[in-house]
Amino acid sequence: MIRGESRWTWVSIAPAVAIRPSPGIIVVPVPTTPAEAFEDFQHSVLNDLLIRSLLLLVLFTALAALLAWWAGRRSLLRLAQVTAAARRISAGSTRDERLDVSGPHDEVRELGDTFDAVFDRLDRSFTASDRRTADPGPG
């Protein structure tokens, strides 16, 4: 076979030889040399590998995005709970309510503990102020 020629030959399985396939004749492309057969096999394997790799890439990208969304949502949920509790305490009439954030010792819990400390100091300050205004003092 000369380079640049077609590397496929047409073999007719029907009793008659046909240059062009006609109805009722099955034409199967057959590689002309073993080296070309191996090259075709290698090409089909690499093509299959490429398709599978792209499908797995899409699948794992979607899975990673879903996992990131879930983790972000879960971590921000605790922060939203702390914000809602702080607003509820700020709008409430009682001074003894606290956030009491539970869960792992992380930044959200530190934020809750800091808010609780601020609320405690404000409560002590208001209590001292109430005592001073309730007690007229000497005189």
Image (cartoon, grey):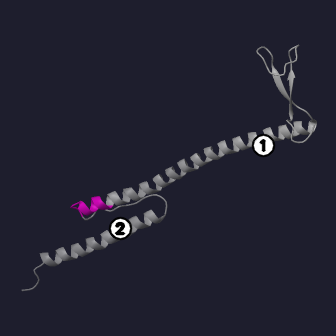
In this rendered view, identify the residue nearer to me: 47 or 25. Answer: 25
x, y percent for residue 80? 38, 57
Q: Is residue 136 left or right of residue 123?
A: left
The residue singled out by tag 1 in the image is: 46
In this rendered view, identify the residue nearer to me: 4 or 36. Answer: 4
* Residue neighbourhood size for the residue with mark 1, other residues' Cα within 10 Å, grouped as few (<14), some (14–19), many (≥20): few
Q: Secondary structure at mark 2?
A: helix
Q: Main secondary structure of the magenta part?
A: helix
Gap between marks 1 and 2, in whole Å? 60 Å
In this rendered view, identify the residue nearer to me: 49 or 47. Answer: 47
The answer to if 88 sits in the magenta stretch is yes
| Residue at the farthest left position | 139
Q: Quadrant of residue 45?
A: top right
Residue 25, above or below 101: above
The residue singled out by tag 2 in the image is: 115
The label shown at residue 133 is none
Q: How many marks?
A: 2
Q: Nearer the viewer, mark 1 or mark 2?
A: 1
Quadrant of image for the C terminus: bottom left
x, y percent for residue 101? 40, 60
Q: Is residue 50 left or right of residue 91?
A: right
Q: Secondary structure at mark 1?
A: helix
Q: Quadrant of residue 20?
A: top right
Q: Amino acid at mark 1?
A: Leu
Q: Amino acid at mark 2?
A: Phe
Please give the name of the residue rendered at 57% of the width and 46% of the height, measured from the top-left corner: 62
* Residue neighbourhood size for the residue with mark 2, other residues' Cα within 10 Å, grouped as few (<14), some (14–19), many (≥20): some
First to last magenta residue range: 86-94
The answer to if 114 sits in the magenta stretch is no
